Image: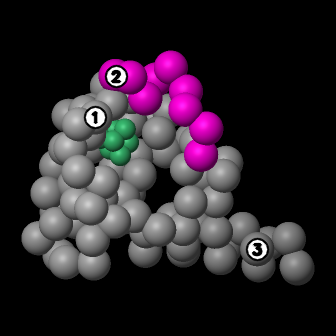
Amino acid sequence: MEFDEWQERAACRGIGWQLFFSDAADDIRAALAICRRCDVRSQCLDAAMRTGEAFGVWGGTPETHRRRIFRAARRRRVA
Ligand code: SF4
């Protein structure tokens, strides 16, 4: 993903990316808590959806959530 201006205001800036790409439930919960207080959450989620980010926590959503949306969108395109 390219760097955008909104990323300078990200609540996760300076926090290790490992927290946002962990499979551990505690880490995912901690990452989602950081997203909840992030001022650029909607820009982050929009970028993740646009670029098809299938891994990690983005825009306050875990990867399982976004994958469901991607699968539903694929099914709609095939139907
Ligand atoms: S919404 Fe979460 S992942 Fe996205 S920039 Fe904010 S803190 Fe980082």
Q: Residue at x 76, y 74 (%)?
A: 74
Under tag 3, what secondary structure?
helix
Q: Nearer the viewer, residue 10 or 66?
A: 10
Report crowding for label 1: few under 14, some 14 to 19, many 20 or more residues within 10 A (C-alpha).
few
For disc 1, the marked residue is 13
Under tag 1, what secondary structure?
loop
For disc 3, the marked residue is 74
Q: What's the mark number on residue 65? A: none
- Magenta residues span 1-9
Q: What's the mark number on residue 9? A: 2
Quadrant position of ligand 1: top left
Residue 4 drawn in magenta: yes
Quadrant for residue 71, please give it: bottom right
The reply, left or right, for residue 61 in relation to residue 44 is: left
* Amino acid at the residue labelled 2: Arg
The reply, left or right, for residue 8 in relation to residue 51 is: left
Color encoding of the figure: one colour
